[in-house]
Image (cartoon, rainbow, N blue to C red):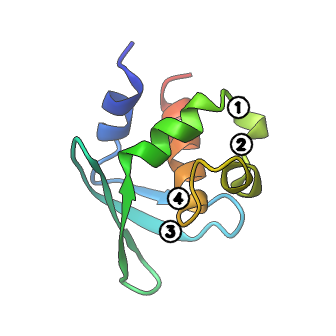
């Protein structure tokens, strides 16, 4: 089974959806340092640092426990928790 970052890399080029609003965003690129996403509704691009994904994974939350507020509250992602949760759910679903 691939390591978690390899699973994140496999999402490059795909469209994912935030869990609360089902807002689509594109996984533009994945590098060793992080992820470049593009929000479809606005065209805005954001960088999600690899550290945020790894810190959220380190929380050890089960798929049904993954919530934006919890990821933010636990300090894993202050600025991108909705994208982090969507990415973690996608790698969980793809490799369940």
Sequence-wise, which precedes: disc 4 or disc 3? 3
The disc, 2 or 4, on the residue closer to the chain's N-terminal end is 2
Mark 4 secondary-structure assignment: helix
Q: How many C-alpha atoms fall within 10 Å of the one at disc 1: few (<14), some, or many (≥20)? A: some
Q: Is residue 91 left or right of residue 32?
A: right
Q: CA distance from mark 4 to mark 3?
A: 10 Å
Cα–Cα span, label 3 and label 2: 18 Å
Establish if 57 lies above or below 48: above
Of callouts 2 and 1, the N-terminal one? 1
Where does label 3 land, which residue? 24
Helix, strand or loop under label 3: strand
- Which mark is on residue 66? 2
Residue sticking out furthest to the front: 75
Residue depicted at 44% across the width and 67% down the height: 25
- In contact (CB < 8 Å): disc 2 and disc 1: yes
Question: Residue beneath label 1, please?
Answer: 61
x and y, in percent, of residue 39 in the image: 43, 75
| C-alpha separation, residue under disc 2 versus residue under disc 1 | 6 Å
Q: Give the spatial CA distance, label 1 vs label 4.
A: 16 Å
At which x and y percent is residue 92?
Answer: 55, 31
Residue that badge 4 annotates? 83
Disc 4 vs disc 3: which is toward the camera? 4
Say whether disc 1 or disc 3 marks the residue closer to the N-terminus.
3
User: Quick one: SS at disc 1?
Assistant: loop
Left or right relative to 58: residue 20: right
Residue 81: x and y, percent? Answer: 59, 58
Query: Residue 22's image quarter?
Result: bottom right
Farthest-out residue, top: 1
Residue 71 shown left or right of residue 23 in the figure: right
Tag 1–tag 3 contact (CB < 8 Å)? no
The answer to which of marks 3 and 2 sits earlier in the sequence is 3
């Amino acid at each position: 089974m691939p390591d978690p970052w390899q699973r994140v890399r496999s999402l490059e080029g795909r469209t994912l959806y935030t869990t609360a609003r089902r807002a689509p965003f594109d996984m533009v690129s994945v590098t060793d340092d992080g992820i470049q996403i593009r929000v479809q509704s606005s065209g805005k691009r954001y960088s999600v640092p690899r550290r945020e994904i790894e810190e959220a994974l380190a929380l050890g939350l089960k798929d049904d426990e993954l919530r934006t507020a919890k990821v933010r509250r636990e300090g894993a992602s202050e600025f991108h928790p909705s994208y982090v949760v969507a990415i973690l759910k996608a790698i969980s679903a793809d490799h369940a």
